[in-house]
Amino acid sequence: MIRFTNDYSEGCHPAVLAAIAAANTEGNFGYGTDPHCEHAQALIREAIGAPDADVHFLVGGTQVNATAICAFLRPHQAVLTSRLGHVCGHETGAVEATGHKCVALPCGPDAKLLPGAIREAVAAHPNEHNVQPKLVYISNTTETGAVYTGEELRALRAVCSELGLYLYLDGARLASALAAGGAGLAECAALCDAFTIGGTKNGALFGEALCILNDALKPDFRYILKQRGGMLAKGFLLGIQYEALMQDGLYEQLGRRSTALALRLRDGMRALGVPFACESPSNQQFPILPNAVLDRLRGRFHWEEMGPRAGDAAEIRLVTSWATEDSAVDAFLQALAQALAGQG
Amino acid sequence: MIRFTNDYSEGCHPAVLAAIAAANTEGNFGYGTDPHCEHAQALIREAIGAPDADVHFLVGGTQVNATAICAFLRPHQAVLTSRLGHVCGHETGAVEATGHKCVALPCGPDAKLLPGAIREAVAAHPNEHNVQPKLVYISNTTETGAVYTGEELRALRAVCSELGLYLYLDGARLASALAAGGAGLAECAALCDAFTIGGTKNGALFGEALCILNDALKPDFRYILKQRGGMLAKGFLLGIQYEALMQDGLYEQLGRRSTALALRLRDGMRALGVPFACESPSNQQFPILPNAVLDRLRGRFHWEEMGPRAGDAAEIRLVTSWATEDSAVDAFLQALAQALAGQG
Amino acid sequence: MIRFTNDYSEGCHPAVLAAIAAANTEGNFGYGTDPHCEHAQALIREAIGAPDADVHFLVGGTQVNATAICAFLRPHQAVLTSRLGHVCGHETGAVEATGHKCVALPCGPDAKLLPGAIREAVAAHPNEHNVQPKLVYISNTTETGAVYTGEELRALRAVCSELGLYLYLDGARLASALAAGGAGLAECAALCDAFTIGGTKNGALFGEALCILNDALKPDFRYILKQRGGMLAKGFLLGIQYEALMQDGLYEQLGRRSTALALRLRDGMRALGVPFACESPSNQQFPILPNAVLDRLRGRFHWEEMGPRAGDAAEIRLVTSWATEDSAVDAFLQALAQALAGQG
Amino acid sequence: MIRFTNDYSEGCHPAVLAAIAAANTEGNFGYGTDPHCEHAQALIREAIGAPDADVHFLVGGTQVNATAICAFLRPHQAVLTSRLGHVCGHETGAVEATGHKCVALPCGPDAKLLPGAIREAVAAHPNEHNVQPKLVYISNTTETGAVYTGEELRALRAVCSELGLYLYLDGARLASALAAGGAGLAECAALCDAFTIGGTKNGALFGEALCILNDALKPDFRYILKQRGGMLAKGFLLGIQYEALMQDGLYEQLGRRSTALALRLRDGMRALGVPFACESPSNQQFPILPNAVLDRLRGRFHWEEMGPRAGDAAEIRLVTSWATEDSAVDAFLQALAQALAGQG
């Protein structure tokens, strides 16, 4: 079985595993107050060009989003997100469970939130009978693989600053965004109030690094981290992993690799005439394939089903990761070519 | 100034005030454990034909909605509401503040939630990565004055039963719904898991009566009522008011009155050729009038602005209540006719 | 039946009822944005000597406490209260339901929180593995009728300022505290970050006025008020009542009256040799009486049982209010004298 | 530096690390729906003798406690815990952040909750003006190293059943409790409504296994798990670790080892005349040592400070783990003997 199911099917990059193994018998203080975390934080501050950033390590994506949002907002304040935003539909109401409404805004198939939609949402919430929009949630890449460029991020920053909103960027797949022409790390740090550098989907066993840039959002974050169950007892495990990822450019290298494989998949499928549900320059691809073709591929390959589409076809999601092998891409394209030919 | 601003601009019906005054020096036990509350509960159980209903009295609408929903749901369960539902946009995230997501569903200008939209929403939330739809929120009348008939309510009940959902009806304006051909009190009791009989907007100083029909939702409600600040120390004030309203048909009589006045307004405006943003058979009317006309009426009449509409016009809301005088309707229609003529 | 059950058994003072009746057919804007509320707010600002105070009107005591606390605190911050504090044991976890821990501190039978206990509690919560103490909750009078003097309040203010804590005073029975030598209105305003002026137990039908003095706690309070169900649609009802109470010294006059009656009860019982569970100079008294005596009084008088005490006796609570008649006190003392004699 | 700081200073047992490494390039489905988790769940069901138990894997202790409690309780229900319970003082109000009050009950220095205290607490919360006690939280071992035997657990079960309470056992240090004569795994499963088998402090990199025995508490737990950020994307990492721990008795073997080392420390200190703050048969020891002695040991050994004690002394906590070496115990006892002698 060759898996394009997601980018968290395997453990971690060998360099990360080696680092964990090497430190296994070390004694370290708990809760992220150890030298590995300090070093990893320093490496991240340097990489993002923000010497004053607060950097916190959490285990998972839903956890970091809900913890950050609940730390940043007052009770009546709400999140603005595209209707396809991960916090909106795929986190079982984690944000609402902290008391805050997620306002779902219209977006196209690229799942991007546009300045105009933000402006309209703020206008539609004029007073104390409505929640108060306060934090704009975006992810890079988006749920459907699209990428915010530096220019697009600057436009969002401008509307947020004008309207008094925080800009929060969920970087669960930031490595692929970086490889696909998205806003760079320094741009994220310069333009966002807070953002995450996702490890789980890019070489770590697990881990999300939360960078807080806005001084007003920094105080007492560790209290909320602990309260919401996000403070790992063996916090050094997160420090060790981010040390490995942030050294010698491994993080960005893995993102380039997963992205290149995805583009090879995309271009190969395009050459075979396959249409896509949305344009994606990153490590998730959303082709639309005839059900008969999918039936021939099933069993040998695995993917996520996105739902039926017109013409006895279906949209699927193919995801590549640091762990995807070149041969997997070759095998898929070859099998697809045969399946398509067999169908004709 | 003649007010069509809303249906809570005045105090209460004289009979209600007289009842409060008559009981003013009585000594009563606190927290709704007094004979007035018991009597009012008995009158309501009789009126709705549900001898086993639990009836609780709360002060306000946002309060009763949030308290009931938070009492009825487990943490991962969500509310389905039309995108125009009151809980969705006009209660400052009160439901989300109790931890539950409100899923906003598409609806037409009548703000009604249709069985198909419910079915689609449940299908779109298939597993533990999504919130679990569990409670359908509707209001009768709707935010835009439309009315669910008994037949429509039965259709909603059917889809709720099929999908394992609770049906909750917010009756803040139930009196006008009853007068306008909406599902009757006994139908509400037979078809809903819980519903409210609104007093604030129909003759009471304040008060909403929550009727819980589903036995599974009854236990320990008074704990939640107290915890959420909804248990009035002088609960007898609510009992006294509902005694007055539920005796001799006063509640329904006031609803008929406010509704008849609104229909007179509607028909008068129609006769003058005024278009409406939505059809309403109840005590809220949403005409669209040229701004020049509105300018001539402003100062003498008061209404709520709903927003600009095409053709240098605006949609406004006119609301009648038990306290609206016949002469107010006459005066408005006369002034409108003059203003329209003057404009021509 | 003569009731000493509590101070919310009756409706409201005749002057308050008259004011409500007089304004019954007025048209007023909703949600506390009307001239009555504005006037009442101005009267309160003048009475407390704080022209910049924000004043909000809520319906009930649990509601105002939970709403204010949840508006003032960040998620990891906690309330310090004496173990007998009302928020701690008698509000069904309303504060915890907003996410905040109430830390119960030791106190004597007077239920007073002392600066030393606050200091120790802060020392016992040193870091992010504990909640962060941030708000000190006291009530004047306390749960057991004791009173904080101006000097005692200054001492609490000093420790709060030193430790970076907010001082919040629940004035549900402030009128009796004022009459019993407690800190005055201007002292409350000068020393507290926020406090309430309770109406429910002192002449109003219902109502608590929340005064916010600390500028940092003022922004957006009306959003939280609405979200937590505390914004009354007919807010003018609260304004009208506080206008009546704050004019011509009615509020303080009613507090003097209820307190004087309680002291007459106390002194009469003392003269009969009755012991008390705690010293109270205010409108609640806690005598300890033999069960045989209580049996003779029961049926003619009503009180709250506080629990059995040594020697086949019980502690009871007797409460007087603006509505208590002089003759009720006379009758009780006379009956008690007979019951005690009959017992001998 | 020799560390007795805690039992989570090192990574994981070599067998666990080997298992993680061996599976590193496997492809597995996400979110705990993989064969490793299924196998580990089966091993746990067998070990606890409960074929129908639901077993869920979470990352950390605060997380599992808060998630389980919030899944099990309705909004008005509260947790009963000893005043020294971990949820009460060391989790930054995580339980309160889900809306539930933790009622802190008196206990001795062993931190154990006794049936009598539970009974008194329930009696002290008689009605809807109080929270409703519903879940009893204990940990085995307790915060101070004491152990509930099977008999003691049966007594708690009896009072819980009588009063309609859930019994929840936090087994963060269950392995040491098992080794120290505590209730066995099968007893935990037979007597508790839910309990955890802690991995973080006994050989795993991280992980807590939650066993739910009460059928009423099982439905939809995975929704809450996801919502509260406790569903690990690479859930298989938890399955792999528990497979390793539950096979060939490794889990219990590691608990025996850490406990035996602690008892050697204890007996050695006792032989030197050192007093203890509390009796502990498990892997945490709480000796009281003169400050002068501690000064001589500091720098070579590390421990947690528990606070000053009479006689220029201090209480410290020494913790052993699977990773503690025999030589560390020898070195400490030898150095302590010298330090004590040097002091005399």
Image (cartoon, coloured by chain):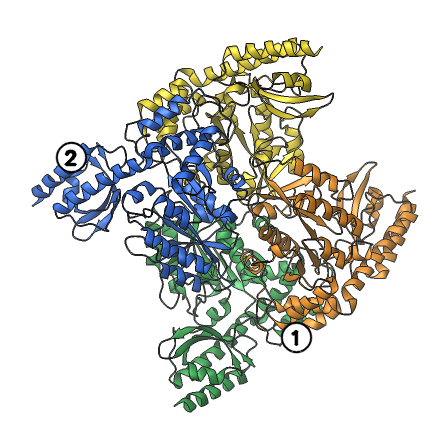
Chain colours: A green, B blue, C yellow, D orange
Viewer-nearest of labels 1 and 2?
A: 2
Chain to which mark 2 belongs? B
What chain does mark 1 sit on?
D
Tell me the kind of residue under disc 2: Ala
Residues at marks 1 and 2, CA–CA distance in whole angstroms? 82 Å
Tell me, for residue B331, which label it has, or none. 2
Q: Position of residue B202 (x, y in %)?
A: 32, 36
**Frontmost residue, A74 versus D29:** D29
Check disc 1 and report the residue beneath it: D23
- Secondary structure of the residue carrying tag 2 is helix
User: At x 59% / y 76%, what residue is drawn?
Assistant: D27
Front-most of residues D159 and C19: D159
Q: Are marks 1 and 2 in contact (CB under 8 Å)?
A: no
Horizontal side of residue C200 vs C26, given as left or right: right
Secondary structure beneath disc 1? loop
Q: Is residue C168 above or below residue B98?
A: above
Identified by mark 1, the residue type is: Ala
Crowding at dot 1, Cα within 10 Å, few <14 / some 14-19 / many 20+, comes out as some
Percent x, y for residue B143? 31, 47
Pinpoint residue A295: horizontal percent, then vertical percent.
47, 83
Q: Is residue B198 above or below residue A53?
A: above
